[in-house]
Amino acid sequence: MPLNLFFLQLFFGLTNGCFYVLLSLGLTLVFGMLRIINFSHGAIFTLGGTFAWAAQEYFAVNYWVMLLLAPIVIGIFGIIIERVLIRRIYGLDDLYSVLLTLGLTLIIDGAIRSAFGVAGHSYEQTTFGTVSFGPIMVPLYRLWVVVFSLLVWLAVWLLVERTKLGSYLRAGVENAKLVGALGINISTLTSLSFGLGMGLAGLAGVLAAPIKTISPVSGENILVVVFAVVVIGGMDSMKGTLLAGIGLGLVESLVRIYYPEGSSVIIFVIMGAVLLLRKQEMKKVEI
Amino acid sequence: MSQDYIGAARPTYLYIYIAGTVLLLIAPLIGLYPVLGTNMLCFAIFATGYYLLLGCTGLPSLGHAAFFGVGGYLAGYGIKVIGITPEVALLAGALNGAVLGLIMGIVAVRRSGIVFAMVTLALAQIVYFLCVQIPQTGGEDGIVGISRGMLFGVIDLSSDTVMYYVTLFFFLAIFYFILRVVRSPFGLLLSAIKHSEYRVISVGFKPNNYKLLVFVISASISGLAGSLKAMSTGVATLGDVHWMTSGYVLLMVLLGGLGTILGPTVGALVLVFLENKLGAIGVFLGSVTGISWFGTLGQSVPMVLGVLFVLCVIVFRQGIAGGLMLLLERISSNRKRPDDPGDFD
């Protein structure tokens, strides 16, 4: 394979890795605060992409507007969902959060299918052109995705690690009751983190719309990959999501170059190996 | 949940089992379409095997679609291309479930709770992609036109009614098997693992081995159910390997009730029946209420299922069978327990 094609493939892998980072960032944020895994995260990703597509198709709303608008709308939707539904299952067995969010997936996907058809849509692509680094031609849009995703990751990291709100969040993860006793409104914090997680998924969807076919099926598929990424990167760690997301995106593209048949399963295989090698964690017990 | 309704010493259960068996035996005679009945029973087998893992051991697997779907593919490919007999096809489904379950289980039982669900889902996705890629499964088209053949060379399965009764036999056998497992010392240990893994370790057991064994048993039953379903419907498709099938069986168990072994059966029968009759129910509701929207209910099965998921979790956690059992208990005991604050009547 010529060198420039090799690097182009690698760059595609990097872009995919950035989507993994954004999606797993949302998942870990929600998991940290609420101790649930949102199985409707993939459907929200699809919803974000569909919003972007529909806004352009029906209202001629610009891509850049949707990049701002869709995450906000979806974030507010997330806060409502948390207030109305998710709130009722705190403290119950994990099973119920799995079922509840799976149900939300079915509802959201069903709504998208009945409104916009089964096939999925590719976004009317505005040409961004390419930029060349020496012999390597890089599509400008993908470069934008990489830079923007990394900036978003950095912003969320700074928000959680360096601001007052973030310190409340981290304290809430450690001991919600104690933080509540200090007069900080935990219930608002949980709503906000769920909304933020959903908003990030929606943002990833809008970002992906111009380069990927967005459909309920693609949302489900990317979600399962992101689960593996989150398991590999560590359920609570934001830096873990960054490293695992980018790294696995690159590995996936390398496998696509040398053994294309294996590219769709390589991440799951790595996850299996990591789980076998890593020390076993245990469920907390109440005595 | 106050207690598990598995208890052996309740004579009421025996009556329920007998009544249920009689009902299933006469169902085709009183108007149940045998093909639908067979499908319902296949999922009842699937859900009962799944219950052993979820209800008894507390492990929420989202990987069981792999065992179920591949069981169907094996039966279909074996019968149609290689020309094996039905009993070999069923055996192949069950054995394959056991082997796949062992491989998946070795990785997955090292985690519990929500991570267990994610890991089994991701591992099952490997199987799904393999099924998409290899030519033997027929890709998007699946395998169609699987003939049923002669079971043990003597029972002609081509009749829908015969197929129903054969499936019913398998269902009853597996139900009885699970019942025995749940009440055995092994079953008690599973329940102990569910409630406190640390304590089980502290008395000298290795929970991982037991979790692995129960995972393999339930995977094997799922494989058998998948083979039966492919034989009765004549098709094996990607849909059965897709992870939504795992979510679907999880819903069945919860809809029926997690606390009782009857739950998964009730959930499976109700859900498959509902799914098949949703269009008719919608038309009926539409004609009664005069709201034309109900008429389109048949086209939006996934959304209705989604609403059912949500309702089940939010308002109906004890499930159909669990709710009925509670009611029955209240009627049969008919006296207040001393620790019950009671209602003032």
Image: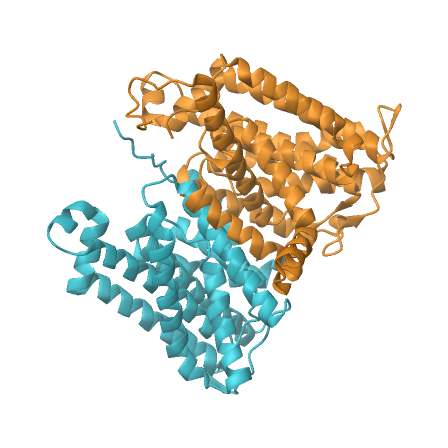
A269 left or right, relative to A118? left
Residue A57 x/y as whole percent? 55, 83
Chain B's colour is orange
- Which chain is drawn using cyan? A
Q: Colour scheme of this structure image?
A: by chain
**Residue B85, can we see it?**
no
Seen as rendered, the residue at the extreme front is B345
Residue B31 x/y as whole percent? 78, 36
Q: Nearer the viewer, residue A48 or A181?
A: A181
Q: Nearer the viewer, residue B219 or A18?
A: B219
Quadrant of the image for the N terminus of chain A?
bottom right
Seen as rendered, the residue at the extreme left is A182
Q: Which quadrant of the view contains residue B337?
A: top left
B76 left or right, relative to A21? right
Residue at point 54% right, 56% down?
Answer: A106
**Residue A20, can we see it?**
yes
Residue B122 x/y as whole percent? 51, 48
B95 left or right, relative to A235? right
Q: Which quadrant of the view contains residue B112?
A: top left
Q: Nearer the viewer, residue B33 or A116?
A: B33
Q: As displayed, is residue B172 above or below residue A273?
A: above
Residue at point 69% right, 48% down?
Answer: B277
Residue at point 64% right, 55% down?
Answer: B288
Q: Which quadrant of the view contains residue A79?
A: bottom left
Quadrant of the image for the C terminus of chain A?
top left
Residue B121 x/y as whole percent? 52, 46
Q: As displayed, is residue A262 above or below residue A283?
A: below
Residue at point 42% right, 75% down?
Answer: A145
Q: As displayed, is residue A93 above or below residue A195?
A: above
